[in-house]
Amino acid sequence: MDKKEVAKILNEIGILLELKGENPFKIRAYQNAARALETSNIVLSKDLKIEDLRGIKGIGSHIADRIKAFVDSKSFKLYEDLRKSTPPGLIEMLKIPTLGPKKIRYLFDSLAITNIGQLEYACIENRLLELPNFGMKSQENILRGIEAVKKYKGKFLFAEVITEAEAVHDKIKIFKYVVRSNLAGSIRRKKGVVKDIDIVAGTSSPDKVMDYFTSLPEAEEVIAKGETKSSIKLKSGINVDIRTVSDSQYPYALHHFTGSKEHNTAMRAMSKKDNIKMNEYGLFRNGNLIKCSSEKDIFNFFSMDWIPPELRENYGEIEAAKNKALPKLIEEKDIKGLFHIHTTWSDGNMSTAQVCEEIKKMGFEYAGISEHSKTASYAGGLKDKDIAAYFKEIDNLNKKYKNFKMFKGIESDILLDGSLDYSDEILSKFDFVIAAIHSSFNLSEEQMTDRIVKAIENKFTTMIAHPTGRLLLARDPYKVDIIKIINAAAENNIAIELNASPFRLDLDWRMCKYAKEKGVKIFINPDAHSIENLYEYKFGVSTARKGWLEKEDVPNTLSAEEISSYLKNKKY
């Protein structure tokens, strides 16, 4: 049993109770329990003793009993009852960025609003203007939020569905009537946002495969069942499509259904020049099949190197494959350490010692702690007076661990005028400085660009964090000339972060390719606030691969000794 999953349920109970207008103390109890469980070292298993749960500060005996019952039976009656008794439209309204459970409950009580459609109509009719704590600005923000929900509906973060995708495929690939299979589509190409999950399977018994697929326990609903294609809907809401072909057709089908459409169109256009017809069933010359036993054979036929799925976006990969000029893409094993990590010194929920232990356990050589700076008071940013103690704690860890290095960093806010929010004297004491935008997102493109360029020109800046400020499926990038930002970074020998949080993946992969061409180094950083977040660097590696990055383009593939020299050279 994953404690993160249980903590998520406890959090959702708190939200559902708030939607119901329940006692604030009861709501807070579940919220506190969720945080306490997630930050604890407890392992949830059948052997779990109730005393262990009750011993965690923040978890009361009543909630401990409910958690134990859930671990034992996988049934959480309170949660299930709350879900059933809460109008689903109210839960969907939580996706609107400016609305929390309390406001949604108030709108339900005051205007009987039960879904997004009713809320949108009420805003158009200006019915919110007379309500306490609402007004024209609130109403406009809600309407913008509704537009964002509509825009992103039916889309999912790669990180949220990859585990489900692999779980379903793991069952397909071992099914006795499946000769070979693979995930395909945007999942295989490691897109940050996906619409569905695609599987291609080679078989001589498609009917048996379809029967098996549509009866999987993961299927909440069977959308369609056919001879060569079937679709199911998972409990998360995402659809899984499976396509069956004969084993001889499998290589062509896998290439075709991996995509992208743009890549496939370009490949077909190229094949036509050689009088070859190319589709999901094969390569044909004058109606005769050109036999290929794998994807590599398909590319070899055209005298091309095999193109990694991440690159198949018609972004120059076909020409590069022809010219034997594809990059040797970075791999997870190339990463030697992680930067951009928040601990309890600001808004992280792990201590510096816990970070040290976990990253050592992950096999890395170093970690770069980078707390929020003093302007980010909402995140417990480091005040000037706290910096000496922060440094001392890291120094003590470096003395304790001889074969592991902790670097002292800061995520310093870029102020409106482009300056960083510490004096030069303080900035000079950090091993590295990550400059970041956390406020005033609504500037003009020129103002925002000039603001970031000025931070790039600051002699203490090591790298620029999440340079476009986007939150996938939640917030569009702020207006910024990212080409100008990359050019400025190249001119000033400043690195840019590829923020590996699955909500960000910022710098975008397309711009990674451009940055590489300009000689700008890209750090792959998890922006971690918890132990679990540390492992999200892997999503950054996937995005880096899409962006054509190689080991040499990423500074945190350097050894501890090499990265120490790199950071020192940046300061002088």
Image: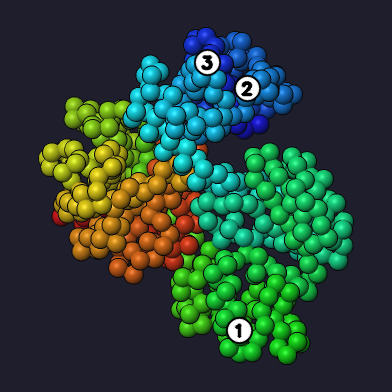
Report the side of 509 relative to 411 (left or right). Answer: right
- Rounded to the nearest angstrom, the CA distance separating label 2 from label 3 is 13 Å
User: Which residue corresponds to mark 1?
Assistant: 271
**Kind of residue sitting beneath label 2:** Thr
Residue pushed farthest front? 125
**Kind of residue sitting beneath label 1:** Ser
Disc nearest the viewer among 1 and 3: 3
- Rounded to the nearest angstrom, the CA distance separating label 1 from label 3 is 63 Å
- Rounded to the nearest angstrom, the CA distance separating label 2 from label 1 is 56 Å
Mark 1 or mark 3, earlier in chain: 3
Disc nearest the viewer among 2 and 3: 3
Disc 2 element: loop
Vertical side of 143 occupied by 205: above or below: below
> Quadrant location of the N terminus?
top right
User: Which residue corresponds to mark 3?
Assistant: 109
CB of mark 1 within 8 Å of CB of mark 3?
no
Disc 1 element: helix
Q: Position of residue 163 (x, y in %)?
A: 62, 46
User: Which residue corresponds to mark 2?
Assistant: 86
Q: Where is residue 347 in the image (x, y as percent from the top left)?
A: 36, 30
